[in-house]
Image (spheres, helix red, strand yellow):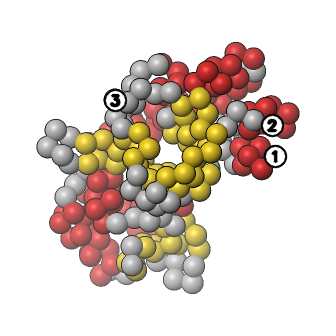
Amino acid sequence: MEDAAFLVRVPLFASLKPALLDELAGKLAPKSYRRGEVIFHQDDPGSAMHLIKSGQVKIATTSAEGEEVIMALLKDGDFFGELSLLDDKPRSANAVAMEATQTLILRRDDFADMLSKHHEMVGGVLVSLAERLRRTDQLLEDAVFLDLPARLSKRLLELAQKHGIKTAKGLEIDLRLTQQDLAAALGVTRVALNKHLGRLQDEELISLESKRIIITRPEELRKRVY
């Protein structure tokens, strides 16, 4: 099955046996979203998790003043929304399609049924939760101990590690990523971000090309963090 082959690419399910992947694939429902469409809002009831088959999704929260902070940028093979399936609480953030996106939806009842029947899935869930917690801890630590130039350099390197593709010019971050998106991911204003992006480009550590960021000298950029 096509969806079973896709599940092998999803870290949460990659270690499952083929028969179990086939069973799980049979419970998935496809859903398509337009660019800019909200997949779910913060505080919505959490009834399903999403696996991104194609496209790009941002997970974000909004302050009382209307300022957006992006918690995660996700692409195909990533998943989101699993926390609400485990604690039966409302969504903790907004999920928005950043381009035309297709997800595969796994409903709470099906998720719980698979966990109860196949205990080997529990390990994958625990690893997923641990990685999320470590990521949150790291974001808090960076906000406290790193200044904006170091945080920016580190985030660019992280995005390149996960979403980078090698080109003749360097390592291109394969995301539809505006400067406002990147500012929201760092929790700063666009003006402040533009200033430091400009410095990195002047020093030829990065290249900015039509909503694409290319890291031209990753080892030098890494020195700005550590």
Residue 152 is left or right of residue 158, and the answer is left
Percent position of residue 201, x then y = 33, 78
Residue 43 is marked as 3
Choose the circle earlier in sequence order: 3 or 1.
1
Outermost residue, left direction? 65
Q: Residue at x 44, y 65 (%)?
A: 176
Percent position of residue 98, x then y = 43, 58
**CA separation, marks 2 and 3?**
32 Å
Near mark 2 (Cα within 10 A), the count class, few <14, some 14-19 or many ≥20, is: some
Q: Are marks 1 and 2 in contact (CB under 8 Å)?
A: yes
* Secondary structure category for the residue under label 2: helix
Res 16 seen here: no
Q: Which residue is mark 2?
A: 22
Near mark 1 (Cα within 10 A), the count class, few <14, some 14-19 or many ≥20, is: few
Res 91 seen here: yes
Q: Quadrant of the C terminus?
A: bottom left
* Secondary structure category for the residue under label 3: loop
Amino acid type indicated by mark 3: Asp
Outermost residue, right direction? 19
Which is more toward the observer, 223 or 122?
122
Residue 1 is marked as 1
Percent position of residue 31, x then y = 57, 46
Amino acid type indicated by mark 2: Asp
Choose the circle earlier in sequence order: 2 or 3.
2
In the rendered picture of this protein, how many numbered marks are placed on residues? 3
**CA separation, marks 3 and 1?**
35 Å
